[in-house]
Image (cartoon, rainbow, N blue to C red):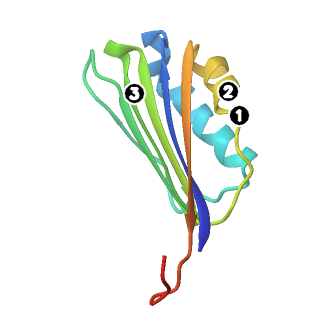
Amino acid sequence: MAGVEWIVEAHGCPSGGLRDLAVLRALFLALIRDLGLHTVGEILWHQFPAPGGITGLALLSESHLTCHTFPEHGSICLNLFSCRPRPRWDFETRLRDYLGAEHVSVRDVTRDYIPVGTAV
């Protein structure tokens, strides 16, 4: 296995988009389509009562995509893990486009396969 995990945090988002299920669905679908990922079943969503946000989970044949929105703080946390290398998505531009994010932080974690018994 060699893959990548992106841990993404966006801040300064207007609260409306963070509570809008249609916006988050469109964001997930664009990310999945653009990276050539494949869902396994339906994407799951849970909308919390106001002023809470939304949690989303897409189980992928490549691993998973999740989000948690915090409208009361103007933020969203995304986590995408793919067990196969993928090009980096333009999270900064796309989160500004979809959610009006003022600041986006992306951490890339490379996941490499190390056979059992191999010295690290």
Q: Amino acid at mark 3?
A: Thr
What is the CA distance from the residue labelled 1 to the residue labelled 2?
Answer: 6 Å
Judging by the rendered image, the residue that carries numbered circle 2 is 94
Helix, strand or loop under label 2: helix
Residue 76 visible within the image: yes
Q: Which residue is drawn at the image coordinates 63% and 41% (left, top)?
A: 29
In the current view of this chain or complex, which residue is farthest to the bottom? 117
Seen at 72% across and 50% down, the residue is 35
Give the crowd class for mark 2: few <14, some 14-19, many >=20 residues within 10 Å.
some
Determine whether, in the image, residue 37 is placed left or right of residue 53: right
From the image, state whether disc 1 or disc 2 is nearer to you: 1
The residue nearer to you, when weighing 10 against 27, is: 10
Measured as percent of width and height from the top left, residue 39 is found at 58, 58
* Residue 99 located left or right of residue 36: left
Which residue is painted at 44% across and 27% down in the image? 76
* Residue 88 against residue 24 in the figure, above or below: below
What type is the residue that disc 2 sits on? Arg
Disc 2 vs disc 3: Cβ atoms closer than 8 Å? no
The residue that mark 3 highlights is 69
Q: Are marks 1 and 2 in contact (CB under 8 Å)?
A: yes
Report the side of 120 relative to 87 (left or right). Answer: left
Identify residue type, mark 1: Asp
The residue pinned by badge 1 equals 90
Q: Does residue 64 sit above or below 17 in this rendering?
A: below
